[in-house]
Image: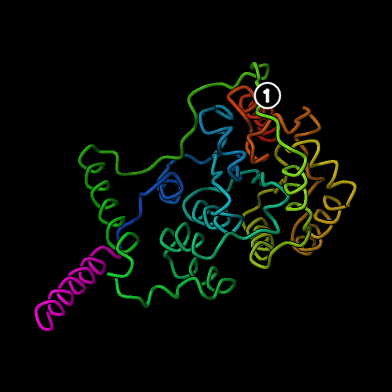
Amino acid sequence: MFIQFPVAALVIALAAQACAWALSEVPMRRDRTDELALAVLSDPTNYKVVLLGDSITRNATARFALGAPGEVANLSTHAHFGLSGELLLLRRYLSAHAPPKYVVVALAPAMYAWVSDIRLVRYNLWHTFREADERRFLKTYLPDIDSHDWFPAIADLQERVVEPLFSWLKNRYLASRGREAARIPGGEFDPDPNAATQASMPVGPEVLEDAISERLNAVPAPINAAALGEFCRLSQQHGFAISLVWPPMASEIERAMVVHGTLTELETRIRDIMKDHCHIDAIFDFNSIRTYTASSFHRDITHLFGDGWEQRYASDLRTYLNALSD
């Protein structure tokens, strides 16, 4: 017990550490966001419009074509990726492509003030974006994001060994099939602007009140404010225009945000951050095209409920993006 067990544990720990070192440079291919981080470097198409967004837009548009082939690069992800992750995707895209004409940012208003838990940001960004300038940006505003790098690999087998190993196996498999280079997915179907819709289960007033209170912060988080400034710098450097849009919101929530002045204050703060380096037009609101109530969303009152509502938003977004590229 006092000799064999410690020796065995040490051998296992050293083996895990050796595997982690051997796999440390493997490009991660765990999910769609990892694939996008590779696709923006390897996709040969120079798109006219680059779309950045959260999971409201990703869920509604992933299956649908938002323009003709080569028109729109849909880089929408999710909240844990955040505005900083979208910025890093855009940086990579610009390093390998001719600049687009437009970059469209479709983030819910609450996303500007919110930053996910540091553990989730690390999982979704730190292991995906490994270039020195990418990690420098993340560590500047999230100084503890690399604290687990000092832990032995045996303490974090999933992120340090298991997932890199499966990513390596996937790379080898795709290389054997001649499909190692990732492409930005373009969607297979055209969305129907008149698709039949369904109503979700009704939510109680206390759920709606909680959802409203979570969305009344109009102060962008420091890392998100820095990302907005970096968007402007890239706009100046590469010559593209930036458009900001609000994706669909429940009308009950939007009314409360208007009454509290949250939307006006947030737009003013965004303009103050960006005014010295680039110009943005009025933020386009997709609620001005259709009325979305709480029953148009899942019980989280965030993501659109069902295929019909998703197709309608995807169709409206496609019309908006095509008007820009024309």
In-image side of 302 versus 1 (left or right)? right
Q: How is the image coloured?
A: rainbow
Q: Residues within 10 Å of mark 1 (few under 14, many from 20)?
A: some
Secondary structure under the numbered disc 1 in the rendered image:
loop
Q: Residue 124: percent from the left, percent from the top?
A: 47, 57
Q: Residue furthest left?
A: 4
Residue 204, placed above or below residue 31: above
Task: Pick whichever, 39 or 313, lies toward us.
Answer: 313
Q: Residue 163: percent from the left, percent from the top?
A: 31, 55
Residue drawn at (64%, 43%) of the image: 101
Residue drawn at (30%, 65%) of the image: 24
Q: Residue furthest front?
A: 1
Task: Pick whichever, 148 or 315, lies toward us.
Answer: 148
**Amino acid found under the numbered disc labelled 1:** Ala
Residue 160, placed above or below residue 150: above
Q: Residue 172: percent from the left, percent from the top?
A: 22, 47
* Corner quadrant of residue 200: top right
Q: In the picture, which quadrant includes the C terminus?
A: top right
Count of numbered circles in the view: 1
Residues shaded magenta: 1-24
* Corner quadrant of residue 325: top right
Query: Magenta span has 180?
Result: no
Q: Which residue is mark 1?
A: 199
Q: In the picture, which quadrant includes the N terminus?
A: bottom left
Residue drawn at (51%, 75%) of the image: 144
Residue drawn at (51%, 22%) of the image: 189
Residue 56, placed above or below residue 8: above
Query: Magenta span has 12?
Result: yes
In-image side of 318 versus 272 (left or right)? left
Type of secondary structure dominating the magenta stretch: helix
